[in-house]
Amino acid sequence: MAQHRTAGGIAVTLVLALIASTLYAQSPPDTSTFLERAVKLGGEIGTYGEWYSINGQDRRRPSTTGRLFIRPTLTFFDALSLNFDILLSTEGTAARQNINQLGLHPTWKWGNAHVGDFTETYSDYTLNGIMIRGGAFNINPGIFRLSAIGGFTKRAVGGGADNGAFDRYLYGGKVGIGTETGGYVDLLFLRVRDEISSLPPSSQQVVIDSTNPSLTPPRRFEVTPQENLVAGILANLKLFENTIQWKTDATVGLFTRDMRVAADTTLKIPSPINKLYRANVTSNVDVAVTSEMIVDVGNVNVKGGYKYIGSGYNSLGTAYLLNDQQEFLLAPSFRINDWSVALSYTRQNDNLLNQKTFTTVRNIYTSNITFRPAQLWTSNILANYLNMDNRSPNDTTRVAFSSLTLGTNQIFVFTPGSFVQAVTLAYIYQQSGDDSPLRAGMKSTTHSATLGTVIPFGTSFTLSPTAGVVHYNLGSFGSQTTQTYGLSLQNRAVENKLITTLASSASFVKSSTSLRNTLASNYQLTQSSVVGLSFGMTNFNGGSLSNLKFNEYVGAVTFTQRF
C-alpha cells in the first residue's frame, strides 16, 4: 500500500508540474521572465510500438508490444533538478519481474536522491547492476559523505519455492570523508533479505541436522530464501595532483543459502552481528578485496592491481558475481607522437581454500599498438595469449588449454570529395587447443577477414558495402567457411530532416543461408520531435546443417518529443 501511495504522489507531482509548465508557457511575455529563470522544464516523452510475427518455429516475443516513457526534468533556480523516469509497457511481468518503472531522481550541487525505481552502485562486489524499488540519497557537503538506501529488489513469483522467487528487500548505507574529484574513504554497510512468507511453503520440508549436515542436505537446485550481510571499506585516494591514484575495496560478506534452517547456536558470531543476523549451517562468511594503483606521468601510465574474491563470498546486491578467484594485474602503456602502446599481464587462479583437487591457473598476455603511417592511414596491431593449466597428472581431469590471437585493423579516411570516403580492413588469426590427449581433436585454427567501405553519392546518398569471411578448422570435426555480405544505403532528404536507411545482409555456411533485410526511416517533425518507422525481415534455412527453417518479421514505430 505504501508503494502505491508513493507512486500516486509522484504521478500527482508530475501532473502538477506539467500543468504549471503549461500555464507558464501561456503567460504574457512581460510576466514570464522571472518564471523562466526560476523554473525550467526539459526532458523527453516517447512511445514505442512493435508488431512481431514468425513462422517455422515458436514465437520468441509477444506479437504486439507497446511502451510509453516519460523523462521530464524540472530545474529550480539552476540549483535543484527533479528528474522523473516513467516507463509503462504492455509486457508487464512477462519477464517474471515487473518491467514497468516509475522513478523520481532529484539532484543538487552536493547531492542526489532516488524515489521509486532506480539503480545504484556502491562497488562491483557489494551493490551494482540491480533494479531497486524504494528510495536512496547521496550527499557530499564539503568533505562529509553520507549515503542511505532501502527498497525491494525482487517481487514474489508464484509456483512454490521449487521454481519461484521470494520478495527480496535491502537496506544499507555509506559514511565517509572526501570528494569524488579529490579522493574519499567510505565505510559501507548492506543488508539483503528474502521474505519467507511471500511464497507458500515448499512441498518438501527442509530439515538439516546441525550436528551432521551431510545426512540431510538441501535440494541442490531448489530456489531457497536467502539473506546477506555485507560490510567493508571503499577508498579512492588521489595524490600529487592525480599523478598517483589508489583504489581499494575491502568487504566482508555473511551469506545464508537457506533461511528456513534452524539457527546454529554453535557458531561463534560477535554479539552485535548475532542480534542482526540469524546464521545457520547453510551460512558462510568470506571476504572480497580488490586494490589498484595507477601512476600517470606525462605520456606513461602504469596500472597494478590485486584481487581476492573468496570462494564463500556472496552479495545479493550484485547482478553477477564470480567468486573463488585471485588475480594479479600489471598494465603499462605509453604514447610517443603518433604511437600508442598498451601492454598487460594478468595471472588468475582459483581454489583459494584448497578445497579442490587441482588449482587452475590462467596467464593472460596482451598487447595493442596503434600508429599512423600516413595522414590518412591509422594502423592497429593486437596480440593476445592465454594459457590455462591445472597441472593434473590424470588425463581425465587435466586442463592444459592455450589460445593465441593475432590481429590487425587498418583504417583509411580520404579527403572530402573523394570517390571513396573511407575503407576499413581487419584480419584476425586465432589458434587454440588443449594438450590433454582426451581433447586432442578439439584443437582449432580460425582466420577471419572483413572489408568495409563508405562511398558517398552527392550530398544525399551514402553507400556502405561490406564483406567478410571466416574459415575455421576444428580438428577431427573438419573445416568450415562462413561468408557474410552486406549493403547499406542511406538517404538524407528534406534538408536532412528525413533519414532513410535500407540495409541487407546475407550469410552462407555450406547449404545454410540467413538473409536479413531492414528498412528504417526517421523524420524530424519539429526541432524537438522525431517520428520513426522500421521494418525487418529475416529468412533462415538451415539446409543440410539443421532442420530449422523460419521467416521472422518485426515492425516498429517510435515517437520522441523533447521539452
Image: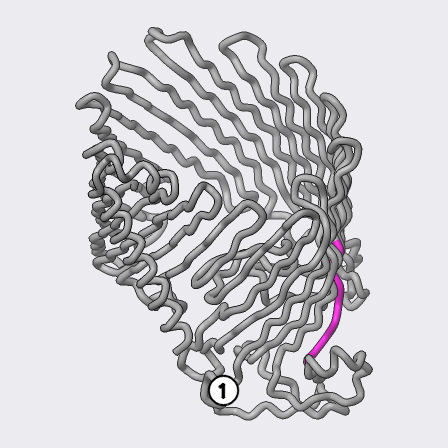
> With respect to residue 194, does 236 lie above or below?
above
In the rendered image, residue 384, in percent from the top left (x then y), is placed at 65, 34
Q: Is residue 327 left or right of residue 525?
A: right
Residue at figure coordinates x 70%, y 90% from the top left: 215
In the rendered image, residue 21, in percent from the top left (x then y), is placed at 28, 48
Pick the front one: 458 or 167: 167
Q: Is residue 348 left or right of residue 513?
A: right
In the rendered image, residue 427, in percent from the top left (x then y), is placed at 52, 26
In the rendered image, residue 90, in percent from the top left (x then y), is placed at 26, 62
Quadrant of image for the N terminus? bottom left
> With respect to residue 252, does 517 lie above or below?
above
Residue at figure coordinates x 78%, y 65% from the top left: 357
Q: Verify whether residue 287 appears in magenta.
A: yes
Q: Which residue is outermost to the front?
A: 30
Specify the segment rendered in magenta.
281-289
> With respect to residue 329, does 491 lie above or below?
above
Q: SS for tag 1? A: helix
Q: Verify whether residue 259 appears in magenta.
A: no
